[in-house]
């Protein structure tokens, strides 16, 4: 069951109901007066979600497939509440402040925060006392075991909030740009590429979580093991090596990883190294062999097998798909930009002197 403030909702269906039904109940003038009295601003000032749908139904052949992508612009106090959420969602705050409450736990939202909405939880989020609260979001298909497995394997299943910093912020905006372009244009193969990029978004958030900016408590031994693994990115590392660096037994280290990250040390290490490889495949022109060596895989063939097993794509196809998506996003932005004539943007025809 979902309830939302009539002044704003991030559910397209609820927003549609609000836009269609309220004007039918009241005359246009009475509707405008009642709205201003109730909310302190004109209905015409309202900004709705810009929501784009990828497809009417999920593909049985694709994993991690997004259902829709979009952006929101809320006014102070606008909110949405869901008592039994169904859709896995990742949202990214770009401007303003707000509050997220998940099963009674409160989080303050600020720019560059990412928050995750999980199926089955009771959550509420609202805009704070700011002129505008802007965010971007991607919604994954409901009732998909592959998405549940992805979130669990990446350590996202029990995480609701994380802050992105530095290059991660640029990557997040780039990912949302590419997803919006794919949803809007729907080029050949767009569903497969959108699935790939949605997976990359989950990896990005997982990597931010592992930076522990938002972890209130972490066992010192676990921190030593993680730091050791990052410092030895290109070297062969075993669980025994990590345990020695952490000054604990391998069995104790396994318990620490399972309690804090819901995965075993070797699973986390593989996921971390492959996420670094994914970033290099997208953001550099390094050779596949060099990337494999950089993240600790001395055999490029074994690296390719591991990468495809975890992501569903070979490294070569991953790079090609992300490059195509990036070019399409850049092309879309270029088309939206006003053309310059003599250094000035031409006025609309109706405003030109005759």
Image: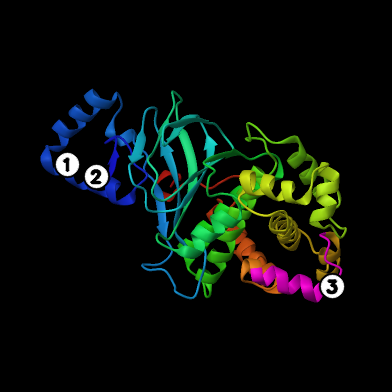
Q: Residue 200 in magenta?
A: no
**Residue drawn where x is 54% and y is 54% of the image:** 151
- Circle 2 sits on which residue? 19
- Relative placement, left or right, of 194 versus 42 is right
Q: For numbered disc 3, what is the local secondary structure?
A: loop
Closer to the chain start, of discs 1 and 3, is: 1
- Circle 3 sits on which residue? 299
- Residue 111 screen position, x and y as percent: 57, 34
Can you tell which of label 1 and label 3 is closer to the viewer?
A: 3
- Residue 30 screen position, x and y as percent: 14, 31
Give the residues in magenta. Answer: 295-309
Q: Nearer the viewer, residue 20 or 161?
A: 161
Alpha carbons under labels 1 and 3: distance apart: 65 Å
- Is there CB contact under 8 Å for labels 2 and 1? yes
The answer to whether 138 is drawn above or below residue 101 in the figure is: below
Q: Residues within 10 Å of mark 1 (few under 14, many from 20)?
A: some
Q: For numbered disc 2, what is the local secondary structure?
A: helix
Q: Nearer the viewer, residue 48 or 143?
A: 143
- Relative placement, left or right, of 44 versus 242 is left
Q: Residues within 10 Å of mark 2 (few under 14, many from 20)?
A: few
Q: Residues within 10 Å of mark 3 (few under 14, many from 20)?
A: few
Closer to the chain start, of discs 2 and 3, is: 2
- Circle 1 sits on which residue? 23
- Residue 288 screen position, x and y as percent: 80, 70
Q: Residue 297 in magenta?
A: yes
**Does any portion of residue 83 appear in the rendered image?**
yes
**Residue drawn where x is 36% and y is 32% of the image:** 78
Can you tell which of label 2 and label 3 is closer to the viewer?
A: 3
- Residue 237 screen position, x and y as percent: 84, 57
């Amino acid at each position: 069951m979902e309830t939302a403030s009539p002044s704003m909702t991030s559910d397209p269906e609820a927003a549609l109901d609000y836009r269609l039904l309220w004007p039918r109940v009241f005359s246009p003038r009475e509707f405008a007066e009642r709205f201003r009295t109730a909310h302190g601003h004109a209905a015409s000032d309202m900004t709705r979600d810009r929501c784009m749908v990828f497809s009417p139904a999920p593909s049985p052949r694709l994993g991690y497939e997004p259902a829709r992508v979009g952006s929101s612009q809320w006014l102070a106090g606008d909110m949405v509440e869901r008592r039994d959420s169904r859709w896995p969602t990742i949202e990214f705050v770009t401007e303003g402040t707000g509050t997220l409450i998940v099963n009674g736990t409160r989080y303050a939202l600020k720019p560059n925060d990412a928050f995750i909405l999980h199926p089955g939880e009771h959550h509420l989020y609202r805009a704070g006392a700011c002129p505008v609260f802007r965010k971007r979001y991607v919604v994954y298909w409901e009732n998909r075991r592959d998405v549940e497995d992805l979130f669990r394997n990446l350590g996202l299943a029990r995480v609701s909030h994380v802050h992105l910093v530095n290059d991660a912020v640029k990557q997040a905006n780039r990912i949302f740009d590419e997803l919006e372009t794919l949803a809007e244009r729907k080029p050949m193969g767009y569903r497969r590429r959108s699935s790939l990029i949605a997976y990359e978004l989950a990896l990005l958030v997982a990597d931010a979580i592992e930076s522990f900016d938002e972890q209130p408590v972490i066992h010192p031994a676990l921190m030593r093991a993680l730091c050791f693994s990052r410092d030895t990115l290109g070297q062969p590392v075993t669980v025994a090596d990590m345990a020695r660096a952490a000054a604990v037994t391998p069995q104790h280290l396994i318990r620490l990883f399972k309690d804090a990250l819901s995965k075993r040390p070797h699973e986390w290490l593989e996921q971390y190294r492959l996420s670094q490889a994914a970033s290099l495949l997208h953001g550099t022109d390094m050779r596949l062999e060099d990337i494999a060596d950089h993240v600790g895989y001395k055999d490029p063939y074994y690296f390719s097998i591991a990468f495809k097993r975890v992501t569903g794509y070979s490294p070569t196809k991953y790079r090609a798909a992300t490059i195509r998506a990036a070019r399409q996003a850049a092309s879309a932005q270029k088309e939206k930009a006003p053309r310059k004539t003599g250094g000035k943007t031409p006025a609309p025809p109706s405003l030109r002197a005759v």
